[in-house]
Amino acid sequence: LGGDSGRDQCTDVRAFGAGCDDIADDTAPVQAAVNSLSGGGTVLARNCKVSNIAWPATKGRTLRLLIEGALAVTDPRGLNWPDNVEIECQAGGTAGQFQVAAAANIVAPSSGVTVRGTGSANHRMTGCNVGVPPGGVGILLDGTGGLSALYELDHISATAPNAPNSIPLKIDDTFWVWCRHCAFNSSPNAGPAVYITNELARAGYSGLIFFDDLRSSYHGIKIDGNAKEGYLAHFFVNG
């Protein structure tokens, strides 16, 4: 996917006053830590609670959010995941079913979306157990507001609660997606485990999607009529 890893500098959010106690809102200190790394680097967050994060432009260099334990998201729009941002969940959380790598949790808001990916360059997420809000979406790759492409998800787990329309992974108007060693599980009354759509019906969007070693339960993968042949382009499942 390219891009500079930007891992030469690491900043702990506690140095900016984060309580890291799963209770207090840590948005301001986490944002201050992120703002200090406009040239790229790593922000370490342990057991933090945030509404959202505004990521600075890094001119092609990568900013990495390293989560230990858990990161609780309260904004129903979803944790912002733009270009050149890598989310790595390292340890201290609960591994999802079938996960074999170290894991940390991204805790869902009460409704809406947990993580929302936008943009078209260098998105990576590894080792995360992502919560799914009731009736909402765990991970949304969202191209409805502009070009959305180049996502890599590795050892990601998301399980829908037993509530209607709950979806672990939704891919909308987005192309070039790689999912490796992931588990997206639905529940009896929930929506599909993976939902692929193309709401704006643009040719070539919601295509070039690759799943390698995917674990899925109940309602499996749904590809709706908007992602029809001629739009979907290429779709691969290996294992």
Image: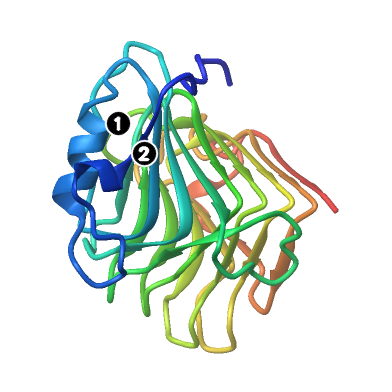
**Left or right, residue 17 beside residue 164:** left
Q: Residue furthest front?
A: 15
Comparing 86 with 133, the one in front is 86
* Residue at the (60%, 58%) spot, across then down: 103
Quadrant of the rendering where the N terminus is positioned:
top right
* Residue at the (50%, 14%) spot, across then down: 4
Q: Residue 10 location in percent, x, y?
A: 41, 30
Q: Quadrant of residue 156?
A: bottom right
Residue 57 in sight = yes
Residue receiving disc 1: 146
Residue receiving disc 2: 143
Q: Residue 177 location in percent, x, y?
A: 59, 37
Element type where label 1 sits in the image: loop
Q: Amino acid at mark 1?
A: Gly
Q: Quadrant of residue 112?
A: bottom left
* Residue at the (76%, 59%) spot, across then down: 100
Please say if the residues under marks 2 and 1 sit with CB atoms less than 8 Å apart.
Answer: yes
Q: Amino acid at mark 2?
A: Gly
